[in-house]
Amino acid sequence: MFRSRLFLITPTDFDAEAFAAPLGEALSGGDVACLLITLPEGDEDAAQLLAEKIVPIAQEAGVAALILNDTRVAGRARADGVQIDSGLEDLKLAQETFQPNRIVGVGHIKERHHAMELAELDTDYVFFGMLDLEEHDEAHRKTIDFADWWAEVFEIPCVALAGRDIASVRPVAETKAEFVALRAGVWDHPKGPKAAVEEANAILDTVAAEIAAAEEAAG
């Protein structure tokens, strides 16, 4: 039975020591496939320390720890892989360095033509949604359209970014994206990160059951 899985993204700005507790809470709330770790820009030492603190927490919970746009830090911190949003040359370098033993995903996709070009490069997943934009309660309409199209046409898994409201997980999961990404929806949830992950997984279970029922009814 098809079921989307959660893909969490660290907050836009966070302290490694202070973040350890809410991260642990989130990962105790149920199934999480991956954690994408964003790093401070312009301070490699700080980025390295942050990665070395956060990566083991995710891995000890059975969650793949990915680093955004920094293969050096990812390698030193023994992360499970990277997501590259910084261009084709960086993507090719990451693939040469990390594949096939570790994960290389790609994001910052704005057009279908660009997405199709990336599909030919043997990336492990594509990410739909702009991490540098302000989050809204609902998933961006273009993100949902991208995921719906991609899941129908391509075999490479896709990640689609939901909104700040946990309820936004439903329309993203209904696209049959393999992974539903959450950021502020988890860390800013009024009942805490654990409750957010529990609620999101309950939605994913419901959507999976609905998809299975629809497929059975269709024969």
Image: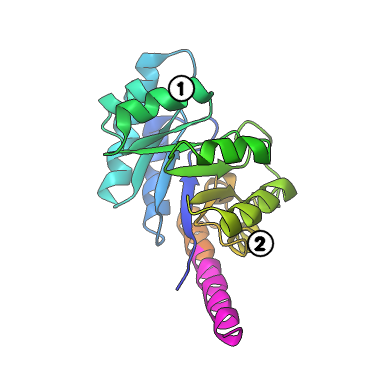
Q: Residue beneath label 2, please?
A: 171
Q: Is residue 129 visible?
A: yes
Q: Disc number at residue 90?
A: 1
Q: Residue at x 52, y 66 (%)?
A: 204
Given residues 30 and 19, the one toward you in this image is 30
Residues rendered magenta in the picture: 201-219
Considering only vertical position in the picture, is 167 above or below 134? Answer: below
Tell whether position 202 is magenta: yes
Left or right, residue 67 beside residue 112: left
Q: Earlier in the sequence, mark 1 or mark 2?
A: 1
Give 136 or 7, whichever is nearer the viewer: 7
Q: In the displayed orientation, state which residue is furthest to the right.
A: 141
Q: Cα distance, mark 1 to mark 2?
A: 32 Å
Describe the element under mark 1 as helix, strand or loop.
helix
Q: Is residue 190 visible?
A: no
Disc tally is: 2
